[in-house]
Amino acid sequence: EVEDDLPPLTEELLDLAEWMSKQYLCPWITAIHAMIPAVLKGKTERWVVAAAELTAELAGQSPLLHELLRRGAVAYREVEQQFPDEIPLLPGWLSAGWLTTEYHVKDRVTHKQASYVTLLLTDEEALAKADSLPKQAEQMRRVLLHLAPFSGQPIAAKELGELLGVSRPTLKNLAAKGWIRLEQMEVLRNPYAHRKFADAKHSYTAQQQTVLKPIAQAIEQGGFASFLLHGVTGSGKTEVYLAAIEQTLAKGKEAIFLVPEISLTPQMVERVKGRFGNLVAVLHSGLSQGERYDEWRRIIRQQVKVVVGARSAIFAPLRNLGLIVIDEEHENSYKQEETPRYHAREVALWRARQNHGVLIMGSATPSLETYALATRGRYQLLTMNERVGNRPLPQVHVVDMREELLKQNRSMFSQTLYQMIEQRLQNGEQIVLFLNRRGFSTFVMCRSCGYTLTCVHCDISLTYHRTNHTARCHYCGYTIKQPDHCPECQSSHIRFFGTGTQKVEEELSRLFPGIRVIRMDVDTTSRKGAHEELLDRFRRGQGDVLLGTQMIAKGLDFPRVTLVGVIAADTSLHLPDFRAAEKTFQLLTQVGGRAGRHELRGDVVIQTYTPEHYSIRHATKHDYLSFYEEEMLNRKRTGYPPYYRLVLISFSHEQLPVLIQGAQTVADYLKARLQPSTILLGPVASPIPRIKDRFRFQLMLKYRDEPKLIDMLGQMNRHFDEWLKQQQLLMNVDIDPQML
Ligand code: ADP
Ligand code: ZN
Ligand code: ZN
């Protein structure tokens, strides 16, 4: 069924989908699905429909036929449930021509409608009619006078009602006279309709001018160009992006602006909308499906010049793309962790090349892969190493928590952090407290026997949720009530462990009675709009402390924040991930960047059990380059990206022997074909060996120079396709995996 008069995909996007299916070894259709709004993927549903040949006499033979004749059509789903015995008879009836089957779109999107009023008279005619109306037709007169200047233009009836206090019958009367047309028309849902956005434009700093020069030149010339903008936090990167977008629009072209997860950075939307107003479409997961669909349709209808959004906004169907900006280029969320397993950075490169456009990737802590390419000239490297207005980077204090223990301080706050919080509270300044929750959770353990609550379907411990006193599996959702006694030894000493945000909040209230804490975590932000609400409250000064996890690390800019505390910096260091040090460095740098961005000087306190670790040492000094060099040596020594590229092939099956046998078969196939320089690791059990009752194994390929590898993996997929289905074995290929 035709949903809209405009095709949802451009030729460029169709080509892109084809490229993706080769590059990421995914079916073409999954790449296309990644490009269009969820509502358009419209699941189809099969219906059985009565044909002209079906007579009452024939229908008398069967309950299903009887039902069909009565209702005209029945969903196949319903046939399965209510008339299962008659399903074998369907083919015969089909060929006899008594019925047909049809497919209909299920859960079809509704385009939102509203009443509109259009004046059918000229300006003068309307005024004359208004004059000629009898005295008691006051409402009609008001409508005519109001509409006179807008002859021929549809005006929302609701607006008229609110503005003039006219009722529905009045409009109907006017329509009956043939003076106005009253009709239902589509309105596009606009999530930002009732918000006003301000824009403050600055004269550029010297460093902004320096980096803008080559960017402006590239935009002016047209033709593909790519930049890495490495700028410390608060150096004014966003201003540079906005300037580049402005210039692109002036050239009559369009821009995509990617941010990690936009609902997490409402301030960014604010700034772009403030600058470009209605020319901006915003796409992110915080909008309702209908809102997202309508924003997307504004793009399709070419009513939009700038698209701001998270990962999938890279597929915005702009037809005259001149610029792509990727803010916080190093962020994990640019990689999709399900099929198609694409990286928005690579897709952006493809689209920029295809459109002869400009790509700007920006970060205070670029990924090693990107920075390495920039040093080799693949991207032009632009650097801004000073904050706007020469504001000093915050002073970083590293606290060794082992010494706190020696001082008999068992609190989660060191003396240093405690004193600084106290001082801020006295001065009426604000504090951001950051809890590094990566690889860390509040698990439930018995203190008597060490028994830990784990999921019955997944090999992973359950996470404690205080709000409803339950323990839940974050992979499959399995939930149990927190037990009062240990299921193993019956002891009552079964408690949750780990430093959750809730626990920090409690500790804060105990140490600083009356302190106002705004807590931001999965629990407090699950409701739509809750995230923005909490940030707004903090901005308005209704909280002393903003306490949160990863989600407060980036993009936030609050003038009165002068202290940032990191409760436990180490937790992300000990993950079984070769990027653990890089992620820790990035996180600490980003968090530190939240302090002292305005007139007030900032301090950062990092609490750690391993102050000597290089990622902590270099983050303390805001020294990206030293970190980069040291980490590159490690990657070279251990054979990880950017020196080697990785492919992760993972398998899952309900039975372990089938799984191991299957993974081994694929490994043997690859061994016989790979170049000797390519390393094949495994098969081994995956880091989480079982999820949702399926066991998991994996193979890892490390390669440097194997140009035909992707083709070969494509052949492997085709070679094993049938066999995998027979074995009911799932195999997944992840090119350049982010999460191991
Ligand atoms: P980054 O993205 O590099 O962290 P921002 O673009 O957010 O930095 O800039 C930091 C702060 O400085 C923001 O409040 C911004 O409005 C302000 N700012 C940016 N450029 C200028 C400028 N040229 N003059 C004055 N203030 C600026
Ligand atoms: Zn026990
Ligand atoms: Zn589970």
Image: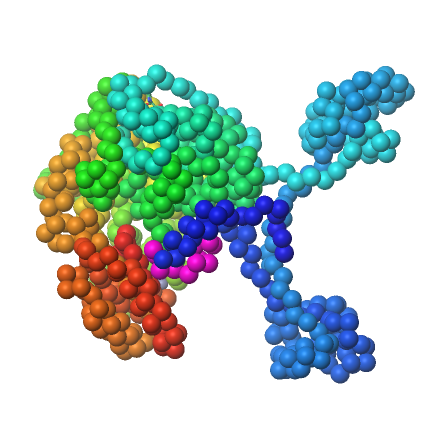
Q: Main secondary structure of the magenta part?
A: helix
In depth, the one of 711 and 410 nearer the eye is 711
Q: Position of residue 302 (x, y in %)?
A: 54, 36
Q: Is residue 694 left or right of residue 189?
A: left
Q: Is residue 88 left or right of residue 412?
A: right
Quadrant of residue 42 in the image?
A: bottom right
Q: In the image, what residue occupies the spot 74% across and 24% down?
A: 151
**Is 734 in the magenta?**
no
Q: Is residue 306 visible?
A: no
Q: In the image, what residue occupies the spot 34% across and 43% down?
A: 349
Q: Is residue 198 left or right of residue 558?
A: right
In depth, the one of 203 and 552 nearer the eye is 203
Quadrant of the image where one finds ligand 3:
bottom left
Q: In the image, what residue occupies the spot 28% across and 64% down?
A: 712
* 134 shown above or below 180: above
Quadrant of residue 133 in the image?
A: top right
Q: Dividing the image into 4 quarters, which one contains the N terminus? A: bottom right
* 403 shown above or below 664: above
Residue stretch rendered in magenta on the structure: 23-35
In depth, the one of 248 and 551 nearer the eye is 248
Q: Position of residue 375 (x, y in %)?
A: 18, 38
Q: Position of residue 642 (x, y in %)?
A: 19, 48
Q: In the image, what residue occupies the spot 65% across and 66% down?
A: 102
Q: Is residue 99 visible?
A: yes
Q: Is residue 587 left or right of residue 258?
A: left
Q: Dividing the image into 4 quarters, which one contains the C terminus? A: bottom left
